[in-house]
Image (cartoon, grey):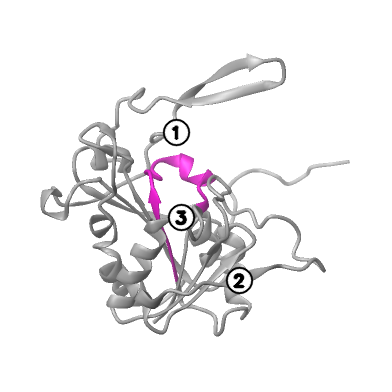
Amino acid sequence: MRVLVTNDDGVGSEGLWALARRVVAAGHEVVVAAPMVDMTGMGAAIGGELGNDEMRYERVDRSDLGSASCFAVDGPPALCVILTQLGAFGDPVQLVASGVNPGMNAGRSTLHSGTVGAVMTAVNNGAHGIAVSQDHLAAGHPADEFQWDTATHLVPEIIERVAAVDKGRRAVNVNAPNVPLDRIDGVATTSLAKWGDAAGVLEHLEEGKLRFVRQPGARAPIPGTDHAAVREGQIAVAELIGFRVADSDLELDGLTV
């Protein structure tokens, strides 16, 4: 399968290359196209109109990825996906793998994640998508390093499963604890938490200036959700349902001007 590997943290993030190495090792044809700089929190933004403006990219040399072509794109991850699907970096791909994000993308706050935004853009542009993230905590404290092998472990098997789907395109969200693989307590298929780790409060610094302060653990994890599973030592896997063509049950007939 031809796979695009991207992320929202940019080409300087080691999680991107760990994911790319895992997909290459699984025998897939890989192209890497990721932002030149950190684009965290961009959701599915493309950074402007796809109009007449120039869109820049640069080649990136990675001897550890064999024949994979690698590019740094001057734009967010969703733009990387769209450019790839329009043929900027060779043939369009059948699947987009996004990550590894250093920090969970759990709960409904995934709406704002550039990691997840890339895979939702993939689904809307003819490809399956897998978003991969890892908890930023290890043993309850901010991690000194990330266990990328744990985060990427399930990716080849999930690629096989989505490839077997007969109809439509699927988006899968994976969140892993930041522990070695032999300490993982299984895999949980979950729902999305209400907030995940995006809960927090605003600090008023001065007139016209605010700061958002995260409060991990401020809300107790709800059993059965992705947030809870990761904090219980499991890898959480959830299918994301995005924009779908369907009949609405919202009564909108008879609106007037």
Sooner in the amino-acid sequence: mark 1 or mark 2:
2
For the point 38% across and 57% down, the residue is: 14
Q: Position of residue 158 (x, y in %)?
A: 30, 67
Real-space CA distance between mark 3 and mark 2, rounded to the nearest whole angstrom: 33 Å
Asked if residue 206 is positioned above or below residue 23 in the image, the reply reads above
Magenta range? 96-114
Looking at this view, name the residue that lies furthest to the left. Answer: 182
Per the image, the residue denoted by label 2 is 58
Left or right side of 87 for 65: left
Q: Is residue 90 above or below residue 250?
A: below
- Residue sitting nearer the eye, 129 or 254: 129
**For marks 3 and 2 on the same chain, the one whose residue lies earlier in the sequence:** 2
Which residue shows up at 28% across the image and 56% down it? 148
Disc 1 residue crowd, few under 14, some 14–19, many 20+, Cα 10 Å = many
Q: Amino acid at mark 3?
A: Ile
Q: Is residue 204 left or right of residue 4?
A: right
Secondary element type, mark 3: loop
Q: Considering the numbered disc 1 on the image, is that residue within a helix, a strand or a loop? A: loop
Circle 2: residue type: Glu
Q: CA distance from mark 1 to mark 2?
A: 33 Å
In the rendered view, tell whether residue 40 sits above or below residue 121: above
Which residue corresponds to mark 3? Answer: 241
Label 1 belongs to which residue?
A: 198
Residue 5 point in image, percent of width and height: 45, 68
The quadrant where residue 49 appears: bottom right
Q: Earlier in the sequence, mark 1 or mark 3?
A: 1
The CA distance from mark 1 to mark 3 is 20 Å
The vertical placement of 65 against 144, above or below, is below
Quarter occupied by the N terminus = bottom left
Residue reaching furthest right? 257
